[in-house]
Amino acid sequence: MTNWRVSSRTRTFRSLFCDAALQERRKPRSPCIARYLSRLAPLPQERAVTAKKLTRGLVLRLFLPFAVAYFTSVLLRNVNAVAAPELVRDFSLNPADLGLLTSLYFIAFTLAQLPLGSLLDRFDSARVNASALIVAAAGTALFSVAPNTLMLGAGRALIGLGVAICLMSSLRAFSIWLPSAQQPMANGFMFAVGTLGAIAATVPAQWAIAAFGWRAVFMGCAGLVVFAVMALFVVPPPCRSRAPSSSPVSMRSALGYVWRTPQARHAFPAVSFAVGVLWAVQSLWAGPWLSNVAGLSGNALASTLICMPIGMLTGNLFHGWMTGRLRAAGRDGFVYNRWMMLAFALILIPFALKLTTALPLLFFGFGFFGAATNNYFALLTPYYLQEIVGRANAALNMGLFGAIFFLQWGIGVVVNFYRTSVTVATGGAATVASADGFAVAFAALFVVQLALIAWLWPARDDVLQQARA
């Protein structure tokens, strides 16, 4: 009779030499089981390994090239506001033409999010970003030499397409190289760099356009984009995920997985709307509110407006640092950030009540508390499969810009509804924006944001508890 007992020596041999091969060949029986097994390890193995090898030089190589690219992208996004008078004069643009020219950037930017996000999941993040920026460099150069509005619009659309993933590629690289507790601070620094780009697109850009002309400024921006391309090709460490790619996840499955993640499902609506409020006000409606409600103009208006990006710069650094400290200590990072979002909703009340006292402090607080919304990119990343992080972040970013478009237009509709007629110096009548229209618009923003925060409130940051389990 055959003896089926296996000796301890044979079991040792199998455990040492055979089990690894068997595990490599063993596949989950269904995608549901694969997703479940992936969720058991919220922090990917590659992130735990590379985190031990991080040095200061490596961190700088990882951060600086992406920072140059993102700074340039935000500069190009906002510089049109300063160059608008020259563009109107040189091309005889009416307000509708100028609005269409600006919207071409955002349309291309939004449509490129998911396709380019899919490339981030499959290829090296730095090289994908650099390749896209080649398109942005061509678009910026075309914009600088455009002889007519058609070429001007084509250049603007190419810029939006090329810079679409400057932020998402950096967040993808951070998710590969940095542990979960360090990602909020790294993201906060990156968002702060973007705020510096927005500041550079104001007074410095205005000075440069006055000194050298708008065409020379845009050609200089094209040179800065080329520099970012070379830096991204040469400097960063490998930024490609080492997660298994034998069965690529389709776009539909990736987005479905994101929506089935409870933390993402609760966060997406509230974060998208809050960021939409932040940028709709900061990029368009803050100035008209100050002029029509507070009665400011000239230097007083400009000195008050600059308090908002300064608050955003401070908030990005502080909230990123605080969220990283909380996560490193095993605390719930969602708690701190949802209280900051509630504070951001409450700061809309003075705008709705038309309060005009301590305006620099009000605008600083608006930017400071609004910056907390950026932390959700880092907070949500550990809950995604490593194969879909790029598409998940791109989906959130697309929602943010969709909210910006809608809210910029929606606030304008409300303000326009309450326009009043005034008598001008020549004796005629003119319609101007009313303070009541701004009050109604900001009150509506407060109510909607409060309702979405109530939807966000049950979300819990349990990634560290899962890791310890």
Image (spheres, helix red, strand yellow):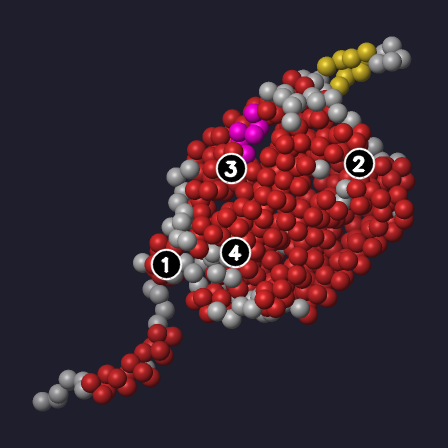
Per the image, the residue denoted by label 3 is 341
Q: Secondary structure at mark 4?
A: helix
Residue placed at 23% from the left, 83% from the top? 11
**Residue 239 position within the rendered picture, expressed as x and y whole percent measured from the top left:** 58, 66
Q: Residues within 10 Å of mark 2 (few under 14, many from 20)?
A: some
Q: CA distance from mark 4 to mark 3?
A: 20 Å
Mark linked to residue 91: none
Per the image, the residue denoted by label 1 is 467
The magenta segment = 344-349
Mark linked to residue 97: 2
Q: Earlier in the sequence, mark 1 or mark 3?
A: 3
Q: Earlier in the sequence, mark 4 or mark 3?
A: 4
Q: CA distance from mark 4 to mark 2?
A: 41 Å
Q: Is residue 241 above or below residue 214?
A: below
Residue placed at 63% from the left, 40% from the top? 311
Residue in front for this viewpoint, 137 or 309: 309
